[in-house]
Amino acid sequence: MAGQPIRVVIADDEPLIRAGIRMILISDPEIQVVGEAADGRAAVEAARVHAADVVLLDIQMPVLDGLSALPELRRAAPAARVIILTTFGERENVLRALEHGGAGFLLKDTAPAELIGAVRAAAAGDAYLSPAATRHVVERLATGREAARAEEARTRVAALSEKERDVLSLLGEGLSNADAGKRLHMSEATVKTYVSRILAKLHCENRVQAALLARDAGL
């Protein structure tokens, strides 16, 4: 994507929120807001028509809510990375969205720099995990999980090597490749290789799913 702007679609039924997000994103010369949508159906169409690189997708929308729109969006614009816009109160919906292939999530009151960083990370192929928000939300999502789910996670994680489990544990904390490398005394490139291996072994589509699995397994 070198030299090309990151093409973003903003999907939220509140005009003021869309306007605020647009103002933040266009302050970065490498990000271009190519479309907006006020409902899930329009979000799917906008992502397809504008060949979006990143879609910021609200969960609570009319006509077709974000959860229902997500699988359709991934079929209509498979190259688009979807970041869920949420609040802490929607934690169970966030879980469902991430498990269905969302590339990460952002709180609606996130700081401007974090919003831009999330879009850049998603466009680069990484799932965006805000360390503060991830630890808080994923821990709350994990509360009350069925024993069977935890057992399944532990069984899947058992296939990993000790070093792979160490890396997976840090994914669960929301660390970037660079920060994980510092913690484990590895290069960022080495951590990235481990992450690719982990995703393949665990049959996870992205880092978010792996992070949730790590928490389910108790890492």
Image (cartoon, rainbow, N blue to C red):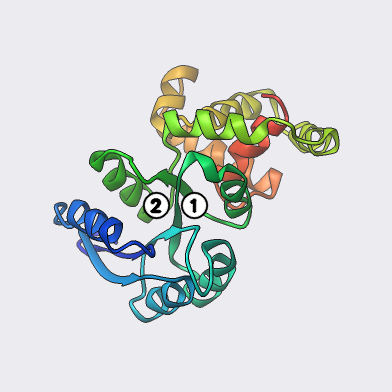
Q: Are marks 1 and 2 in contact (CB under 8 Å)?
A: yes
Q: Quadrant of residue 3?
A: bottom left
**Dot 1: within a 10 Å radius of its alpha carbon, few (fewer than 14), some, or many (20 or more) residues?**
many
Q: Amino acid at mark 1?
A: Ala
22 vs 102, nearest the viewer: 22
Question: Height in image: 15 above or below 215?
Answer: below
Residue found at x 63% / y 38%: 212
Residue found at x 24% / y 40%: 113
Residue 78: x and y, percent?
50, 70
Question: Height in image: 40 above or below 191?
Answer: below
Q: Amino acid at mark 2?
A: Ala
Task: Assign the C terminus to one quadrant of the image.
Answer: top right
Question: Height in image: 27 above or below 215?
Answer: below
- Side (left or right) of 146 relative to 98: right
Q: Secondary structure at mark 2?
A: helix
Residue 64: x and y, percent?
53, 72
9 vs 67, nearest the viewer: 67
Q: Which residue position holds label 1?
A: 103
Q: Which mark is residue 60?
A: none
Task: Assign the N terminus to one quadrant of the image.
Answer: bottom left
Residue found at x 35% / y 46%: 118
Labels in figure, total? 2
Residue 57: x and y, percent?
43, 60
Q: Which residue position holds label 2?
A: 122
34 vs 127, nearest the viewer: 34
Question: Height in image: 39 above or below 170?
Answer: below
- Side (left or right) of 35 relative to 43: left
Disc 1 from disc 2: Cα separation: 7 Å
Q: Secondary structure at mark 1?
A: loop
